[in-house]
Image (tube, rainbow, N blue to C red):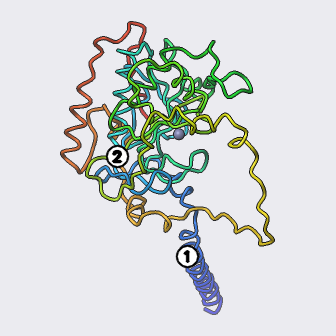
């Protein structure tokens, strides 16, 4: 019986070695997890955290609980770049985008919104693109009007947005800009829930120079780099929200002043001067989960819904532990009335099931 005993001993050694290897690998893995950039953790989430809806932290340092998706297609919108999975937001943001789409189509002669990035399913930092859009209260809307047909999934990946600027200038191209662009921007700024809108300085100047209507919301339009292909809507922290960090409101007045004129000097566009110092620059470290508000760890751990459809706004079946919120969503969804929409707006197509 010496041979089987030998085999047994070898097998036992193999098993023990494997167990040691497993135990050993578990330790560095745990270490790597704590070190893992938050953008990788949040970038990997495919579905939201089923928790009461909550924007946690600040626009550029936070996460989102209870996020809902805007449908890929609505009566007056189409979502773009579907592969990015950034159609998620706080229910208040999604409701506001849908409201803007309806108002713009019914009252501003704007055929519908092409919707860019909102947030990731659980918000948080992203692997590419934005510094903000982390708490589900930011949305990018293209300055290209929605075409008169339903775009295919591949068109939504490939079509480029249109710049509003004359090539190589800071000024709006009047062959592309229309009064409807001005109306949809001023409409978005007019909503009390909207905190500010980021827009290229050239577009802000165009509005300052040409808008003859109510200018009381003009100050919410904040000139900033980029933003000539799209505008960026930022809404305020929802009323009564805890742990949502507000931004200081924009300065009083229209902003059609020296602060705007500054953008048309060389200064903002000059390349950054290298700092005169011998000290090596500290390495910019990726944000980690521990850098975000503590509640974001729960957002990462929380279970997801059974399907995306369950948490798509307007689908009428939003699963939420927050009963009151779910009821509000139901009401908002049923408030869709295609009454008054221009005839050329396509009929909403059912969302693709996946
Ligand atoms: Zn944006």
- The residue lying at 33 percent from left, 38 percent from top is 193
Q: Quadrant of the C terminus?
A: top left
Q: Give the label on residue 56, or none.
A: none
Q: Position of residue 280 (x, y in %)?
A: 77, 70
- The residue lying at 30 percent from left, 15 percent from top is 338
Q: Position of residue 231 (x, y in %)?
A: 52, 32
Front one among 202 and 142: 202
Q: Position of residue 258 (x, y in %)?
A: 57, 37
Label 1: few (<14), some or many (≥20) within 10 Å? Answer: few
Q: Please give the residue where the numbered disc 1 appears in the rendered image.
A: 26
Q: Quadrant of residue 278?
A: bottom right
**Relative vertical location of residue 26 with respect to residue 329 in this rendering, above or below:** below
Q: Report the label total.
A: 2
Q: Quadrant of residue 170?
A: top right
Q: Earlier in the sequence, mark 1 or mark 2?
A: 1
Q: Give the label on residue 306, or none.
A: 2
**Relative vertical location of residue 61 with respect to residue 168 in this rendering, above or below:** below
* Residue farthest to the front, as pictured: 258
Q: Quadrant of the N terminus?
A: bottom right
**Relative vertical location of residue 202 with respect to residue 284 in this rendering, above or below:** above
In 3D space, how far apart are the residues under numbered discs 1 and 2 (Cα atoms)?
Answer: 30 Å
């Amino acid at each position: 019986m010496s041979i089987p005993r030998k085999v047994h001993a070898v097998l036992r050694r193999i098993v023990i070695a494997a167990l040691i290897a497993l135990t050993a690998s578990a330790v560095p893995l745990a270490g790597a997890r704590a070190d893992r950039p938050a953008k990788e953790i949040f970038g990997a989430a495919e579905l939201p955290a089923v928790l009461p809806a909550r924007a946690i932290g600040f626009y550029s340092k936070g996460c989102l609980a209870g996020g809902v998706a805007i449908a890929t297609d609505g009566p007056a919108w189409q979502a773009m770049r579907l592969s990015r999975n950034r159609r998620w937001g706080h229910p208040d943001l999604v409701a506001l985008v849908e409201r803007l789409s309806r108002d713009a189509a019914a009252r501003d002669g704007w055929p519908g919104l092409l919707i860019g990035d909102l947030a990731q399913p659980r918000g948080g930092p992203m692997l590419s693109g934005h510094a903000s859009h982390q708490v589900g209260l930011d949305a990018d809307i293209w300055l290209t009007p929605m075409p008169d047909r339903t775009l295919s999934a591949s068109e939504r990946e490939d079509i480029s947005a249109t710049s509003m600027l004359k090539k190589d200038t800071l000024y709006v191209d009047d062959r592309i800009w229309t009064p409807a662009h001005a109306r949809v921007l001023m409409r978005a700024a007019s909503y009390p829930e909207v905190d500010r809108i980021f827009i290229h300085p050239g577009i802000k100047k165009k509005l300052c120079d040409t808008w003859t209507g109510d200018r009381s919301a003009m100050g919410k339009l904040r000139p900033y780099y980029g933003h000539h292909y799209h505008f960026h809507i930022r809404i305020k922290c929802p009323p009564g929200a805890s742990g949502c960090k507000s931004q200081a409101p924009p300065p009083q007045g229209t902003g059609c002043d020296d602060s705007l004129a500054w953008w048309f000097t060389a200064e903002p566009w000059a390349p950054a001067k290298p700092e005169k110092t011998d000290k090596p620059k500290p390495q910019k470290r990726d944000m980690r989960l521990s850098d975000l508000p503590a509640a974001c760890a729960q957002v990462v751990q929380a279970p997801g819904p059974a399907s995306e459809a369950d948490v798509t706004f307007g689908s009428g079946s939003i699963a939420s532990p927050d009963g009151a919120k779910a009821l509000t969503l139901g009401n908002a969804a049923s408030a869709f009335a295609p009454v008054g929409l221009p005839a050329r707006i396509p009929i909403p197509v059912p969302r693709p099931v996946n």
